[in-house]
Image (cartoon, rainbow, N blue to C red):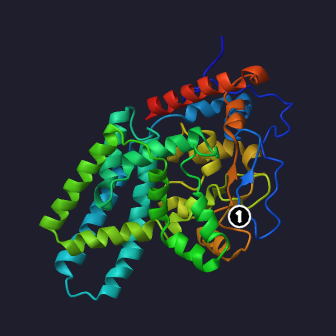
Amino acid sequence: MPHHTADGVQPARVTHDDPRHPLYLGKWKRPGKTDIKDFVHDDFEEPHRKRRQAILAKHPEVRELYGNEPLTAVIGAAAVTVQLMAAYLVGCVWTDLHWSAVLAIAYLVGGTVAALFGVIIHEAGHNLVFGSPLTNRLTGLMANLPMVVPISQSFRRYHLEHHQFQGVDGMDPDLPLDAEVKYIHNSPLLKTLWVFCYSTMYVIRGAAMKKQPQRWELINWAFIICADVLIARFMSLRSLAYLAVSVFFGYGMHPGAAHFIQEHYIFRDGQETYSYYGSGNILYLNIGLHNEHHDFPQIPWTRIYKLRRIATEFYDPLYGHTSWVGVIFKFITSPMQGPQSRLTRPYKAHLSGRREYRVPAENNSTSAAAAKRRDSAMAASEA
């Protein structure tokens, strides 16, 4: 009888004839010219599913790290309190404060806390805070409360799809749009503006997929609209503006937002996912350990470093970042970096990693369609 992983998916069979075994790094190369306006392409499935099975085969004790971390909700509640207090002070007490000072507070305090909200929403999106999906959704709504715009439930939906279809053309919502590649490319000035406006681009990418909003997304909208009205009524519009600017800063040109570039923008040949091992992980709940997270999305932030220590022979050889500021600087200044610095794969390659055997050529179209329906159903069930 075939066994299943903790996320309910039958794993791909780990075979040593895969030339990427055991680290599952690709043989592809980054573009060698600066004028290329296209993604890097690969014909293999994403590396994390097979690497997870390779790690579990050697270190079965890793399964003991699976579970939840309620402390995340406590940290989230504290962060929400800090941000609302800052909004009250800026909007209702320090009303004579010059706009430049308000912007400085919005960046240093508001942006820093807003970036933390995203990490908490991420943990809740994977059901890593509490044991039930409902309580995790409510945790996400709590962290979303001071953010002015409704993102927690849409992020949950699209982020799970990103895990499900990493790098798949037209199916991974984390991939930049063709327009981003075409118009931003490798211009330092345009890349700087792109990083500043990254939060807006993330929303536009989701909208470009033209999916009908789900019930929880509508609940999210209603919740945030009510929260915004109450903040404007019982604090001030200045308080609401402070919260909005904080989100813009915290998801843009801010060290706490650098992980959006760090995670999957290509910095080395053959590697499509990257981890960060700097001090920022202390404040941002180990969000930098992205290879480890994709390999084991069942492990909460308080135990993800234990995974790295257990399976060190799998992670030490991978390239990792040590500075989020350095990530942003390299991305903006390097003529080889830009929105095009991402790996994509066809759905057929993705499918090959979701089955224990390769689909016979004569049945490719039928089997691929069936598997696509199965993957979509699984993503819906996880949501």
Q: Residue 218 versus residue 329: which sits nearer the camera?
A: 218
SS category of the residue bearing label 1: loop
> Residue placed farthest to the top in the image?
1
> Which residue is label 1 attached to?
37
33 vs 23: above or below: below
Which quadrant holds the C terminus?
top left
> Residue placed farthest to the left in the image?
234
- Residue 264 seen by the camera: yes
- Residue 253 seen by the camera: no
The spot of residue 127 in percent (x, y) is: 43, 38
The spot of residue 120 in percent (x, y) is: 42, 51
Asked whether, in this view, residue 51 is left or right of residue 67, the answer is: right
What residue appears at the point 80 percent right and 38 percent down from the top-left corner?
22
Q: Residue 357 versus residue 128: which sits nearer the camera?
A: 357
Q: Residue 200 versus residue 84: which sits nearer the camera?
A: 200
Asked whether, in this view, residue 130 is left or right of residue 379, the answer is: left
The spot of residue 104 in percent (x, y) is: 38, 81
Mark 1 closeness class: few <14, some 14–19, many ≥20 residues within 10 Å: many
Q: How many marks?
A: 1
What residue appears at the point 70 percent right and 44 percent down from the top-left corner?
345
Residue 244 is drawn in which quadrant? bottom left
The spot of residue 274 in percent (x, y) is: 67, 55
179 vs 166: above or below: below
Asked whether, in this view, residue 255 is left or right of residue 49, the answer is: left
284 vs 372: above or below: below
Asked whether, in this view, residue 324 is left or right of residue 31, the answer is: left
What residue appears at the point 62 percent right and 60 percent down from the top-left corner?
262
Which quadrant holds the N terminus?
top right
340 vs 72: above or below: below
Question: In the image, what residue type sits under mark 1?
Answer: Lys
